[in-house]
Amino acid sequence: MKLRDRLNIGQTHLHHHLAPSEFFRALEAVLPSTVRFSELHLTVDTTGNAKVDGSGVAKSFNALSAASAAFATDSRIKDVIFSKMTINRADGSVSFGFSATLDPKLIAFTPDITAGSVQPTTGTTTTP
């Protein structure tokens, strides 16, 4: 097998590799600290469409409403639906179900080409 063929196979594998780090960064940036997820399930169908389903707990309905408004500001997380809402009478927290569609770029593997770059060094040269 030629090197070019091996590199093409490697590129194909990386192209189909999922890396949800950017999705988790988006969640961290968008979600209020009063809303947390206890479960998240990420699925990608054969056409590359990504969907996330899960459940969580919000401190209150207002916190869940703030989360809903925050998701509306991020165009990469679409069709957000909060469902199965249940109030915990003891503390007023709200349990909920969650589903959304994701922009495939949000979970696509993109290597950081600067991570392995050689940093320039400084030095002096002398001429005779």
Image (cartoon, rainbow, N blue to C red):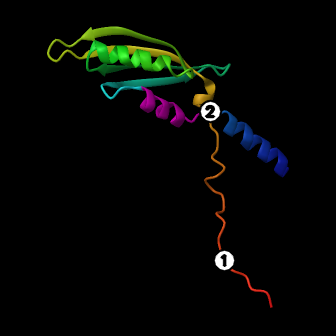
On the rendered structure, is 73 left or right of 83?
right
Q: Is residue 5 above or below residue 55?
A: below
Residue 104 falls within the magenta-colored stretch: no
Q: Residue 3 appears at what percent x and percent y?
A: 82, 51
Name which residue lies at 85% across and 50% down. 2
The magenta stretch is: 18-30
Q: Which mark is residue 123?
A: 1
The image quadrant of residue 37 is top left
Name which residue lies at 33% across and 29% down. 33
The amino acid on which the numbered mark 2 sits, given as a three-letter code, is: Ala
Q: CA distance from mark 2 to mark 1?
A: 40 Å
The amino acid on which the numbered mark 1 sits, given as a three-letter code, is: Gly
> Would you call the spot at circle 2 few (<14 residues within 10 Å), some (14-19), or many (20 or more)?
some
Report the predominant secondary structure element of the magenta stretch: helix
Q: Residue 125 appears at what percent x and percent y?
A: 73, 82
Q: Residue 114 appears at what percent x and percent y?
A: 64, 52
Tell me if residue 53 can be seen.
Answer: no
Q: Which mark is residue 108?
A: 2
Q: Is residue 89 above or below residue 52?
A: above
Q: Nearer the viewer, residue 35 or 104?
A: 35
Q: Nearer the viewer, residue 104 or 3?
A: 104
